[in-house]
Image (cartoon, rainbow, N blue to C red):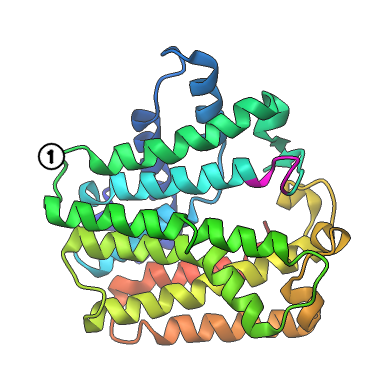
Amino acid sequence: MTLEALETTQNFALFRQHAVQRIEAVLQSLLPDEHILPARLHGAMRYSTLGGGKRIRPLLVYATGLCLDLAPEKLDRPAAALEMIHAYSLVHDDLPAMDNDDLRRGLPTCHKAYDEATAILVGDGLQAQAFVALSEPDWGVDPQWQVRMLAALALAAGSRGMVGGQAIDLAAVGHELALPALEQMHLHKTGMLIRCAIQLALCAAGVEENSEQGGMLLQYADRVGLAFQVQDDILDEIGDLQQTGKAQQGADRSRNKPSFITLLGLKEAQNYAQRLLEEALAALQSWQHEADHLRALARLIVERNK
């Protein structure tokens, strides 16, 4: 069954299954084979990217494509490029100089499975490979919009996006942040890549961000991006370790990192996540069943247990 056909079934579980299978196959094809020199680096890149995960960002790309009446072939490379950036960020986040985590999804983190130097190079390689995936010619998107995709991904991944948010996060250790400052940090660190999922789909469809469609979808993305981080903070505090694949509960608190839990408390953080979900769903009011998978993704982000 195609992703287009799954729109009419309104069956999110099937859509999710097929979309995840699709992005796994695309990533398999776009990542360098582990037998190509340097073999160890390429093996580590594949280990870090193909080791499972929720694939939320590619799902957002494909689900937005349904709202914009796009064939999934126009979304494969944007979805894969975004997931490569996300995978690189996780490899670097896990390093001893950052969060110093030994487990990711219940498996040894890259620097544990390989070594620290290899993990640094894996992040570098995945970031570059993401732009290779988007910049190659003749995969169905007008070159003008390809350039805009490249710019959107670079901005989302860089110092004014994810990396900048990570820098703010590191600088905030041991300090208290007010809610607006905490929101801004996470709109960069987590939210910019989620926003970029919608931006890439808009580019693939040739839809301007300042159009009515673009504006509402980006409003949805911003609410979902914050909700994702709020739920991450909740799971860090109370999540089942077998479900989250982490080594301990309360890791952020033990590192004295500001979070929505430390600022708001557990109950109010849960209420805040629900408010963000309601705002995200409200942004999709102009769409009917074609946005059902975006609605389901927003609910999944807030209700997930890992």
Instruction: Kindly identify which residue carries mark 1.
Output: 138
Give the main secondary structure of the magenta stretch.
Answer: loop
Q: Residue visible at 42% across and 87% down?
A: 282
**238 or 46: nearer the eye?**
46
Q: Is residue 9 visible?
A: no
- View extreme (right): residue: 254
Q: Is residue 39 above or below residue 85?
A: above
Report the magenta residues as a range.
93-98
Between 109 and 156, which is closer to the camera in this rendering? 156
User: Residue at the location (30% across, 75% down)?
Assistant: 289
- Please tell me which residue lies in front, 150 or 70: 150
Q: Is residue 51 above or below residue 287?
A: above
Residue 121 location, quadrant? top right
The picture places residue 25, in percent across and down from the top left corner, at 37, 34
Query: Can residue 17 be seen by looking at this rendering?
Result: yes
Out of 53 and 160, give the one closest to the viewer: 160
Left or right: 132 with respect to 303? Answer: left
Asked whether residue 284 is drawn in magenta, I would say no
Q: Is residue 190 above or below residue 32?
A: below
Which residue sits at x=74%, y=69%?
A: 234
